[in-house]
Every structure is written in C-alpha cells, then in structure tokens.
C-alpha cells in the first residue's frame, strides 16, 4: 500500500510538485511500452443515426466505442477499444468505498477539411498524472493515454461535427477496481476514455452566489487534483444556491472566506476597470488549461493582467463604485461563460452590460484557434 506521506516533502508539499512538475512514481511503469498495442473490437451497428446533433444535452450522449486499459499485478495490461457498454464491478471495489477516482475534460474539433484537432492535450495528460499521484493511483503511460485517445477519435470521427460550436467532449478517467473494504489504496485500476458530442455547457444567463460557509477545497487537500470527490462535495451547496435562483457558486478560501477562488466547475476572472484579475493556482485551485490559455491570449492582446488573490471586499467595493466591469468563468466544458450578477450576504449585485467585453473577445479568439479558423501562433492545436 502506498503511504502518501512518502510524497517528497510530505502532503503539504503537493503544490510545489504541481508548480515544478516533478514526477514522483509510486507505481512502476512498464518499460516495454511499445509491446501492448491496442486491440480494436468494432461495434456491429452504429447508433449515430438516432442522435439529434442540433439538440444535444451536455454529457448525455456517447459515441459507439470506448477505450479501456486495466492496471493489474503492478503493470498496465493490453489496451482495448470496444463497443460502448456498461461493465461489472465487485461491490467491494475500492472506488465505491474510498473514492479513488480521477478524470480529465478535453475536446476535439473538426475543421472545414474534415481534419480532427485536439487543444493542448499534453497539458491534460500532465494534469491527469498529477491527479493520479495525489490520489495514490498509478500514472498512465503517455503512449497508452495518447494512442488510445487518437485511435478512439479516429474510429468515431463521424460523431465529430464541423462548424463552430460543435465539439467532441472527451472524458478520460481512472477508477480503483481492486476488491476489499480495508482502507488502503487499491492494487487494481481501470483507465477509460469515453466520447460525447457536445455544444454549450451552460444555457442562458449565469448568476452566482459567493460562498460564505461552504468550501470547495482546503490547503493540504485535493483541490488541485481533478478528483471526483471534489465535484461531489460541491453538489449540496450548489443545490442550495440553485434553489435561490443562482446557477453556480463562487468558492472562497476555506480559512477566512475572504478570497475569491473558483466559480463552480470553472476558474473565474474579474475585470476591474481595464485590468483582468484571477486568483493564482494553489493546493485549492485547479490549474485550468483554459485559464492559462486565456491569460496568455489576454497578454498578447495588450490587456493588463494581474494574477493575485482577489478579495470579496474589493469586488463588492468595485461594484459599488462602478469599476467592476465583468466576471466570467473559464473551463474546457464552458469555454468562457459571462456572469451577469452575484450575491453576497443577501445583497445582489448586477453587472453592467459592456460592449467589446474581454469575455467575448477572448472566447472568440480562443474558439477560432480551436476550430482552426485562425492561425494558432501559440502552437496549442494538435492534429489527430
């Protein structure tokens, strides 16, 4: 069993790991990495003609195939692409009892030449293994992750539709499948990738509630990992916010609830006058790929960017004196989502309607790069 205290510098040093990208391998990785070629079992029939691609609910429809690779006896087994279908797990599987589960969110795009493209997949791969280490799970070798992803997309490429706004949402994930209810890390895992054709994540206007009591994450916790439990813990306070007419919660720091950190499933940005502010990544805040892309793009556009802790008090003051121009969330699923207002201590603050907003500018430029409608001067897009 892996003791997380073996992490260099102890659990408290996890943020240093994230910043330096040092690789700590608690599990052995196969040295004969090219021997386990992917087995492909094709579906007898396709369900694609049953799908209304003009009316997709996010994350509700899945393609004909999935990718799967098991970790057993200290090594990764032969990967397989096979028809999408349910699978059986023992009731004592560790994922059910101790929550060893991580995932990523990615997208693929089809350009006007019918070529498929990924956006910064290397960053998703690195973050996936960062999450794996923090959750005492084995790292997935790059060839299994990337080859599996590429071959799965190629097999189901007809599900990726052309046109801006059409995307293929990609969900790589890993769960603990080892049996037994003793409280220690699993010795068996299942890594999978599933695909879901998608349009927009949020529909309509988004209002948010600033958290005053509940927290998404704490120092020394797993907030910087894309772990399933992080999202489960959000559901209850978000449901309370929904009942009050808000779509999401802006989380604050666990210690003082005075610092603005993330917005629901997104990193969050604030525009005060003409400066774009966002909180720095930490043990509590996910290192968002869309977030870092927007920061680079904003700097290139000449926008003044300030990455620092943002206080609730300065946001309220900026609302009162008229200097708060925009709030928007950013993430793979949502891309860029403007927030029209927020509530704090039972007071609702409406944001002004801004022409030529930073949110619309950055979203337009980012999605043009992703859909190959503009030159990718950053080198972020990768052909499948």
Image: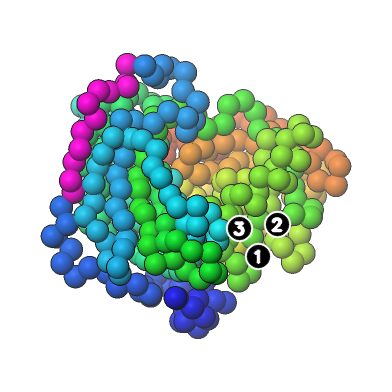
Alpha carbon of mark 1 to alpha carbon of mark 3: how far? 15 Å
Identify whether 255 is placed above or below 171.
below
Which of the two labelled residues, at mark 1 and mark 3, occupies the earlier sequence position?
1
> Which element type, helix, strand or loop, lies under badge 2?
loop
Question: What is the span of residues highlighted in magenta in the rendered image?
Answer: 38-49
Circle on res. 226: none
Q: Is tag 3's residue or tag 2's residue first in the polypeptide sequence?
A: 2
The residue where tag 1 is placed is: 218
Q: Residue at x 65, y 49 (%)?
A: 234
Q: Residues within 10 Å of mark 3 (few under 14, many from 20)?
A: many
Find out whether the residues at labels 1 and 3 contact each other: C-beta distance under 8 Å.
no
The x and y percentages for residue 277 are 61, 53
The numbered mark at residue 279 is: 3
The N terminus, quarter of image = bottom left
Residue 215, label in figure: 2
Q: How is the image coloured?
A: rainbow
Q: Is residue 48 magenta?
A: yes
Q: Residues within 10 Å of mark 2 (few under 14, many from 20)?
A: some
């Amino acid at each position: 069993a892996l003791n997380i205290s073996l992490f260099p510098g102890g659990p408290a040093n996890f943020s240093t790991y994230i910043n330096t990208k040092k690789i700590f391998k608690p599990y052995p990785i196969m040295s004969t990495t090219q021997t386990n070629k992917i087995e492909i079992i094709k579906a007898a029939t396709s369900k694609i003609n049953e799908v209304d691609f003009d009316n997709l609910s996010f994350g509700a429809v899945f393609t004909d195939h999935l990718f799967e690779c098991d970790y057993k006896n200290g090594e990764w087994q032969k990967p397989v692409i096979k028809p999408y279908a349910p699978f059986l797990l023992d009731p004592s599987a560790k994922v059910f009892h101790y929550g060893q589960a991580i995932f990523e969110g990615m997208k693929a795009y089809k350009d006007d030449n019918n070529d498929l493209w990924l956006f910064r997949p290397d960053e998703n791969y690195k973050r996936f293994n960062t999450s794996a280490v923090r959750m005492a799970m084995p790292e997935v070798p790059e060839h299994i992750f990337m080859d599996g992803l590429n071959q799965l997309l190629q097999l189901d490429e007809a599900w990726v539709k052309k046109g801006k706004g059409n995307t293929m949402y990609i969900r790589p994930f890993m769960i603990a499948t080892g049996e037994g209810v003793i409280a220690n890390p699993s010795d068996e895992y299942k890594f999978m990738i599933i695909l879901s054709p998608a349009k927009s994540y949020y529909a309509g206007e988004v209002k948010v509630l600033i958290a005053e009591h509940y927290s998404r994450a704490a120092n020394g916790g797993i907030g910087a990992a894309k772990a399933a439990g992080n999202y489960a813990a959000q559901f209850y306070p978000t449901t309370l916010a929904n009942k009050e007419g808000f779509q999401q919660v802006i989380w604050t720091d666990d210690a003082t609830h005075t610092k603005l950190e993330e917005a629901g499933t997104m990193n969050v940005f604030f525009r005060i006058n003409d400066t774009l502010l966002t909180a720095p990544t930490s043990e509590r805040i996910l290192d968002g790929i869309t977030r870092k892309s927007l920061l680079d793009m904003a700097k290139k556009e000449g926008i003044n960017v300030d990455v620092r802790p943002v206080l609730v008090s300065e946001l309220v003051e900026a609302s009162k004196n008229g200097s708060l121009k925009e709030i928007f969330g950013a993430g793979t699923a949502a891309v860029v989502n403007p927030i029209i207002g927020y509530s704090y201590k039972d007071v609702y603050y409406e944001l002004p309607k801004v022409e030529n907003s930073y949110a619309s500018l950055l979203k337009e430029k980012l999605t043009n790069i992703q859909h190959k409608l503009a030159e990718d001067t950053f080198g972020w897009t990768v052909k499948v």
